[in-house]
Image: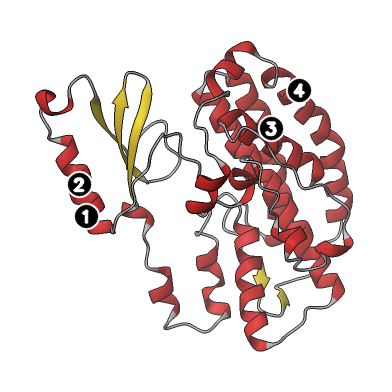
Amino acid sequence: MAFTTREIESPDPVTRVVAADAALHRSDDDIGEKMVLNMGPSHPATHGVLRLVLELDGEIITKATPDIGFLHRGDEKIAENMQYNQFVPYTDRLDYLAPLSNNVAYALAVEKLMGWEVPARGKAIRTICCETSRISSHLMGIGAMALDLGAITVFLYTFTEREKLYNLFELLTGARFTTSYTRVGGQIRDLPEGFIPQLKNFLDGFIPSLDECDKLLTRNRIFVDRTRDIGVISKDRAIAYALSGPNLRGSGIEHDLRRTHPYLDYDEYDFDVVIGSAGDCYDRYLVRIEEMRQS
């Protein structure tokens, strides 16, 4: 998650929530011209149930106090009373934007503990799952970001492509959203007949659609003004906050587990690790755009 803030304090959860509630009830005399806003856990601009207590100075967020709230679901405790494969469906819910990747990550962890090695075909199938999930997740991220900034057309483009991916997920797993496809030691089934041709057909149409999104946003004066130099996260702060993925790389840190600690057979694939330079919202957007091309 990328925080568009100047400062984020993260004491222990109880202290953090108490402090946030106290901030909400401070008088105008205490906070001067600043305003405290409770964003979430249910808000039109949020895509999840995280609660953020924001302190605003005009349009600038000067402090954000996160409260995990309903996002805490006790998955680790639930897993204590299950066999390894019984927990696979719960990994779908860890990140609903990329359930196939969650399935793979969990299976890899258990297989490493067991000392098991998945056959080459199984690794290739898992790689397809991870990269299509990456595209699906980035489409959601860019589409929702564009919608919040008023670019409705881009939102329609990204969600059209995302629906096509869901059709592929349904063909592969039998489900569009909660896939539960990977198993410890392999997959629940092999690739269905016709999957590869349909995947190639999707990719043929996806790149032109991505190019349209690129044209609509990347040099759009309004979009650039609303994202460049906004939510800047320096390299040091990105590391201190333990950011990962495109949010970390957007701050200019060339760290991608597929390259630094290859899993599956990623060391056999040729791809570029995309990084930003300014660490702002605009760079994080650019990283996601180019990562979809790499996938």
Q: Residue at x 71, y 25 (%)?
A: 213
Separation of residues labelled 4 and 2 (CA atoms): 45 Å
Q: Position of residue 176 (x, y in %)?
A: 62, 52
**Which quadrant would residue 171 be assigned to in this image?**
bottom right
Q: Earlier in the sequence, mark 1 or mark 4?
A: 1
Whether pointer 1 and pointer 2 mark residues with C-beta atoms closer than 8 Å, the reply is yes
Q: Tell me: 247 left or right of 45.
A: right
Q: Earlier in the sequence, mark 4 or mark 2?
A: 2
Tell me the residue that label 3 is attached to: 286
Amino acid type assigned to the residue bearing label 4 in the image: Glu
Q: Which mark is residue 15?
A: 1
Q: Position of residue 124 (x, y in %)?
A: 83, 65
Q: Tell me: 28 left or right of 95.
A: left
Tell me the residue that label 4 is attached to: 212
Separation of residues labelled 1 and 4 (CA atoms): 46 Å
Separation of residues labelled 3 and 2 (CA atoms): 36 Å
Q: How many marks?
A: 4
Separation of residues labelled 3 and 1 (CA atoms): 36 Å
Amino acid type assigned to the residue bearing label 1 in the image: Thr
Crowding at dot 4, Cα within 10 Å, few <14 / some 14-19 / many 20+, comes out as some
Q: Is residue 235 above or below residue 95?
A: above
Q: Tell me: 203 left or right of 153.
A: right
Q: Is residue 26 above or below residue 22?
A: above
Q: Position of residue 263 (x, y in %)?
A: 75, 68
Tell me the residue that label 2 is attached to: 19
Amino acid type assigned to the residue bearing label 2 in the image: Ala
